[in-house]
Image (cartoon, rainbow, N blue to C red):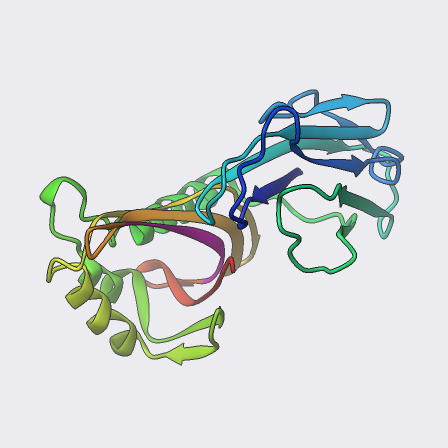
């Protein structure tokens, strides 16, 4: 499994090498049931059971630094055991975001899950990639949002949780996005998956993962990201998306 920590400098002051943003990640209750993969990115270091990062992100909500690292769960780890991960930030020029105590707790229960067959996983990967590609209008190419009618079931349920809770039918979702991506307001746009976990049980499947998006909105840089979840069903015509939901980072 992979952990990701993203630092947002949402304040008005640049961090510097002399006055950096920083955080520590206590892995003691992760590494009792898993092994660190020696793969930390973004300048993070691991000593013993503590991951440490510091750096000078510039001011601005769109400036982010992402640290990711992986652990491999021990084969003999008991079902129901928990990986308890605790990250803490240090006060500095970066404005504190919720939670107010400056801590981030992540608890992951260890469960034995059947792995999807390679051919099924490959089909779901392809279906998800086609979904994200439907919104791509970079280099003057027309976005193909209409393909969602082929990738998704007609009665699909679409929900956004953050920043404002809304639900859509398939047609309610497609119409405004076709217009936004074709009338010149949102250009050079694309979305892409940054991480994913997929579970398959017979003819149903679910997928959860992070994503990023980037483009120009009314001529200004537009970036963001968050988490998307997909529900899949195997139909007589192959796998289709029956629902998806997402929340955007604040």
Residue 15, image quadrant: top right
Magenta region includes residue 224: yes
Look at the image and give the residue range highlighted in magenta: 221-231
What is the x, y in percent for residue 35? 79, 27
Tally the numbered discs: 0
Image-based side of 154 in relation to 165, left or right: left
Magenta region includes residue 28: no
- The residue shown at (22%, 72%) is 176
- The residue shown at (66%, 31%) is 19
What is the x, y in percent for residue 9? 55, 44
Image-based side of 224 in relation to 99, left or right: left
Viewer-proximal residue among 151 and 237: 151
Name the chief secondary structure element in magenta: strand
Q: Where is 193 relative to 71, above or below?
A: below
Viewer-proximal residue among 195 and 220: 220
- The residue shown at (88%, 35%) is 28
What is the x, y in percent for residue 174? 24, 70
Which quadrant of the rendered structure holds the N terminus?
top right
What is the x, y in percent for residue 75? 81, 33
Image-based side of 106 in relation to 32, left or right: left
Viewer-proximal residue among 227 and 94: 94
Residue 180, image quadrant: bottom left
- The residue shown at (72%, 32%) is 71
């Amino acid at each position: 499994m992979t952990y990701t920590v993203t630092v947002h400098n949402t304040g008005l002051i640049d961090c510097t090498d002399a006055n950096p943003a920083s955080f520590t990640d206590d892995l003691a209750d992760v590494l009792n049931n898993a092994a660190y993969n020696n793969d930390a990115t973004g300048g993070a270091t691991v000593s013993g059971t503590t991951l440490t990062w510091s750096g000078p992100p510039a001011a601005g909500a769109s400036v982010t630094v992402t640290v990711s690292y992986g652990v491999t769960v021990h084969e003999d780890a008991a079902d129901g055991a928990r990986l308890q991960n605790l990250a803490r930030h240090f006060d500095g020029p970066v404005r504190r975001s919720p939670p107010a105590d400056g801590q981030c707790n992540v608890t992951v229960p260890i469960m034995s899950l059947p792995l999807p067959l390679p051919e099924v996983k490959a089909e779901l990967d392809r279906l998800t990639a086609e979904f994200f590609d439907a919104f791509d209008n970079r280099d003057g190419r027309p976005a193909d949002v209409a393909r969602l009618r082929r990738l998704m079931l007609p009665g699909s349920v679409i929900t956004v949780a953050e920043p404002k809770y809304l639900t859509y039918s398939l047609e309610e979702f497609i119409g405004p996005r076709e217009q936004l991506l074709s009338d010149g307001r949102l250009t050079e746009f694309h979305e892409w998956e940054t991480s994913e976990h997929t579970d398959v049980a017979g003819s149903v499947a679910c997928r959860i993962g992070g994503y990023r998006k980037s483009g120009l909105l009314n001529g200004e840089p537009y970036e963001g990201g968050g988490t998307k979840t997909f529900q899949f069903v195997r139909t007589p015509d192959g796998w289709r998306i029956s629902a998806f939901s997402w929340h955007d980072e604040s």
